[in-house]
Structure formats: C-alpha cells, structure tokens
Amino acid sequence: MTQVLAQVKNQAPDQRRYDVDWLRTLAFGLLILYHVGMYYVADWDWHIKSSQQSVWLQDLMILTNQWRMSLLFLISGIALSLVLQQHKFSRWRLGGLRTNRLLVPLIFSMYVVVPPQLFYELQQQHGLTMSYWAFLQEYWNVDTSLAPFKQSSIGLFTWNHLWFLPYLWVYSVVVLLLFPLFNKLGTGFHKLNLPLWLVFGFLVMAMVLIWLSLRESYPVTHALLDDWYSHAKYFLAFVFGVLLPFVKGVWQQIIDRRRVLLVIAILGYSWLMFDRHGFLDVGDELDGLMIIKLIHGVLLSLNYWAWILVVVAYAGHYLNFTNRFLTYANQAILPWYIFHQTLIVVFAMQLLPFSLPAIVEAPMLILLTSLGCLVGYEVVRRTWFTRWLFGLKVTSFNT
C-alpha cells in the first residue's frame, strides 16, 4: 500500500487518476442498487412499487441518498479540470464534446429509453389500459390529453433519472466559460497550502447556508429551471471537484486523514439515525427555533461532506490502479447509466406476476438489470451511429 500512496504523491500532472475512474464506476454502479431499493423501500414515492415494502430499508438507503449524486458531480468536476489542465482540448472544443456526449443521449433517451418508465407507472398506479404503442403516440404528442397530472410544458416528455445529464451540461458550460477565473483561484489556493480542516469547515458552512436558505423554499424537482436548492448543492460539489486537482496537497491530506473522516462520517450517520427514530426529539416548540435548525444543518452538512471525502480518500489510497475491467467500465458507464432505471422498471413488472419473495426477487432484479445493461452496451458500441446516440466516442469498432 505504501507504493500506491507514493504513486499518488508523486503523480505527474498529466498522469491519469485511476482512482477517479474507479469512483465514477462505483458511484454509477451504486445507482443500480439504490434504484432497485426504491422499488422496495416503504413510504418513498417511485415510478412503480413492490407489494413487499420495507421500512428498515430506509435507514440503509439514507446512508448514501444525501451525497451519492453530489459525489458524481464532484467526480465530474475533477475529470473536467484534469482534462483542461492537460491542454488536450481547447475550452470551446471541450464544450462541443460535452454537448455532444450529454445532450444527444439525453434527447434520444427521452424519446426512446425513458418512456417505459412512465408507461408502467401509469399502468400500475393509475390504471392505464392502452397498449404500449398507443401510449407512445400520446407520449410523443406534446398536445396530448393523457395523464395531465404528469405533464409539463412539453407534455409527457420527461428525462426522469437522466436529469443528471442536463445539470452536468449546464455546470460544465459555466466552468468552461469561467475557467480562467477558476484557474487563478486554484493556483492561488495551491500557493496558500491550505490545511484540510479549513477547507472542510468552509465546505460544511457553505452547505449549512445552502440548507438553511434554500431547502424549504425550493424543494427538489430535478426540473432544471426551478431547482435552486439542488443547483446550489450540486454546483458547490462540482466546483470543489474542479478546484481539487489544483490543490493536490489538500487531496493528499484527504487521503491521509481518511480514518478521521470515516469516524466523523460514522458519527454523523449515527446521529442521523438517532434523530430519525425519535431519540433526539426536542419537542415542537424548540424544534422551530433557529438555533435548533442551525445545529441540525451543521450536523447534516458534516455528515454529507464527511462521507463524500471518505469515499474520495479511500479510493485515492486503494484504487489508484487500472485493469481490464476499469478500461471496459470507463467506456460502458454512460450507456449503463442510461439503460439501468428503465430496465429495473421493465424487469420488475415482468417479475411481478410470479409473486416471488423479495429475498429472491431483488437479487434477480439486480442480476437481470446488470445483464441488460451489459447487452445494451455491447449492442450500442458496435456502430458509429449508436455510439453517437449514447455519448460514446465515434470511432470504428474494434473487437
């Protein structure tokens, strides 16, 4: 392990950070488990729901649901910053590549990949009886009268789980336009030789401010234009990711302090569980006081950032290497992300008539979804056109 650590410390600026690749792969892989969990977890709304719902599953899923998407934005910020610092592409060229690899798959998937999610949601929860083809004609018709409670200004069109793509595109455009500023900030922070705990404290306080000022006024919508709490939270993580490669000393401190961060994260999650289960109830009168809200916001933010940094730290310490699996996963991860939730919904609906116990059905659902993603990627990577539609590099296919 000392060799791995030395490799991180002495890494050349243009050397690939394989720990970032592993983080991206594992974070997207977690989405399959999380969204399968959404099918079974009690009291949490989702597109379809199993009749076998579990309350205790909430506690397990809360471990990651506060920070898992923020981690993806942080990773994306790191990746964008590393590419910019290597000067392989101009900012404008990189902006074009990002547009092609994020918006083309988004638009195509909204037409083709996402619709089964809404079809089965309407079928299971609202008694829809029409065929899938008939539904598609309504879905593609912006002036449809079907399911008005699910419509927006563009009818039934939705990006569902693919909301990450337009958000990432917008944040990328902002950073690309302002990168000279971020470059100066990063260089300045590097010269200051910032201690980790100062950076950690700033991140926590920034998140507290976001939580107190925006969370209640702007509930999460994933609709891009009105989602200001989410934007503040995710853009903060994205910008921190952009700046982190500049301050390699802070990055190394995160890795070195991984055990302390893990203790903070575990304590934060423990507090969250005690609070959720009523052991820290202060009563309605005190609960509305600003000081109580402030304490709650600080503890939530500590938990949030501690877990993000713990994952970054342990990946940096143990996963800065590559192998054939990682090389494959780097290419496959975007199509897997595009396919996974639709496959979960489709396979769950196909398994429903068999009334399998959840302990049998859930592993089958995970396996079928993973196999479906694998097959889907193997299909789309074989022609330049399908590669383009799913955000892959458009090159001649080589076995």
Image: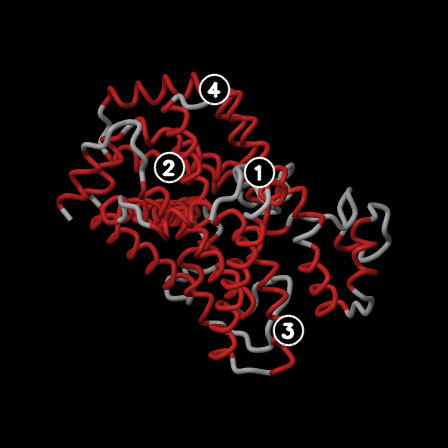
The answer to whether the residues at label 4 and label 3 have Cβ atoms under 8 Å apart is no
Choose between 202 and 83: the one closer to the eye.
Answer: 83
* Residue under pointer 2: 205
* Residue under pointer 4: 90
Rendered view: 368 above or below 171: below
Query: Callout 4: helix, strand or loop?
Result: loop
The amino acid pointed to by label 2 is Met
Residue located at (47% from left, 19% from top)? 90
Query: Callout 2: helix, strand or loop?
Result: helix
* Residue under pointer 1: 102
Residue located at (20% from left, 50% from top)? 259
- The Cα atoms of the two marked residues, 1 and 2, are separated by 32 Å
Query: Callout 1: helix, strand or loop?
Result: helix
- The Cα atoms of the two marked residues, 1 and 4, are separated by 18 Å
Q: Disc 4 or 3, which lies upstream in sequence?
A: 4
* Residue under pointer 3: 350
